[in-house]
Image: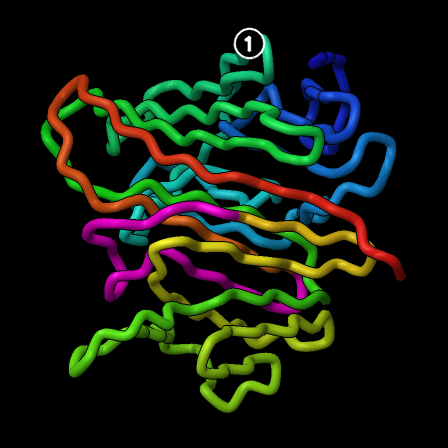
Amino acid sequence: MVTYSDGKSFLGNTLIVSNGHLYLEIVKDIGPRILSFGFLGEENLFFHDIENQITKDVSHIYGKGKKWHIYGGHRLWLSPESDLTYYPDNLPVDIQKIPNGAIIKSPKQDINEVELSVKVEFIADSQVKITHTAKNKGHKKRFSLWGLTVLKSGYTMRLKIDEKKEGLLPNRNIVLWPYTDIHDKRLELTNSEIVIKSDKRVSQPLKIGTYNDNIKAVYEMGEYVFEKCFLGQGEYPDFQCNFECYTNDKIFEIESLSPIKEIAENETFEFWEIWKLKKVAK
């Protein structure tokens, strides 16, 4: 049985949705944004930018005084990344309660002319399905949906990479961003796995991407293990990445990407992922 209760956060009013095992905290005054996630009555695993340290001035696009704030939690963006993707999502959202979760819908974005929504559904005691949807409210456009889950830094992520036998053809792609140092001690590559050991003492950013038909990213956070799972098939941005992650001293982002799609006015498309949470012995 799913329950709903009102809450308060550093961003204002929230709705707390729970299945009795897990809880999700949804911000009412901005978004769409899932601010917090964890076992009911226990620690929130998502990063919160309470001191408002991570921002970007986007006044040259969206108007005088407009700023984008990371805030924290899980957000929905558009890809490929550009200044336009840093839309200042600072308006109240519409939240619809559904039998096994909730749907969070934002107003139409200026300039981008899209409406974004995020549906959360409890599908097991310790599993949540997150469905990202974009509706095009303007001229025809081509983009990918981008789900960014911003967790606390200081822990270890493991991701299996593709090991299909392709004969004479390549079977793995590892994509690096300009600021990523291939010799970074936080990064470990094996023939079958990407491992990133984030460090709260290291501010230098690190970002890496890859493609896999069946993504399962595991972030080991002490006694908690967070998993993000999704499927891939199609054309993707960023040298064909359907998975990306970014870390510095403050955050660890686990990022999913949908295939790139061209959509006409009033057309929608969606992309889903599964979150799993479990506890392990200390």
The C terminus lies in quadrant = bottom right
Residue 28 shows in this picture = yes
Q: Residue at 64% of width from left, 28% of height from top?
A: 124
Q: Nearer the viewer, residue 9 or 245?
A: 245
Q: Secondary structure at mark 1?
A: strand
Residue type marked 1 = Ile
- Residue 129: x and y in percent read 52, 31
Q: Residue furthest bottom?
A: 183
User: Is residue 259 left or right of 252 when viewed as pictured?
Assistant: left
Q: Is residue 31 left or right of residue 152?
A: left
Magenta range is 229-250
- Rendered view: 39 above or below 247: above
Q: Residue at x 46, y 76 (%)?
A: 192
Q: Quadrant of residue 146?
A: top left
**Residue 76 place in picture, x, y as percent:** 43, 37
Q: Residues within 10 Å of mark 1 (few under 14, many from 20)?
A: few
- The quarter of the picture where the N terminus appears is top right
Residue at label 1? 98
The verdict on residue 44 being magenta is: no
Above/below status of 22 relative to 167: above
The answer to which quarter of the image holds residue 270 is: top left
Query: Compared to 92, does 281 lie above or below?
Result: below
Residue at point 77%, 41% (across, down)? 44
* Image spot of residue 167 (x, y percent): 19, 79
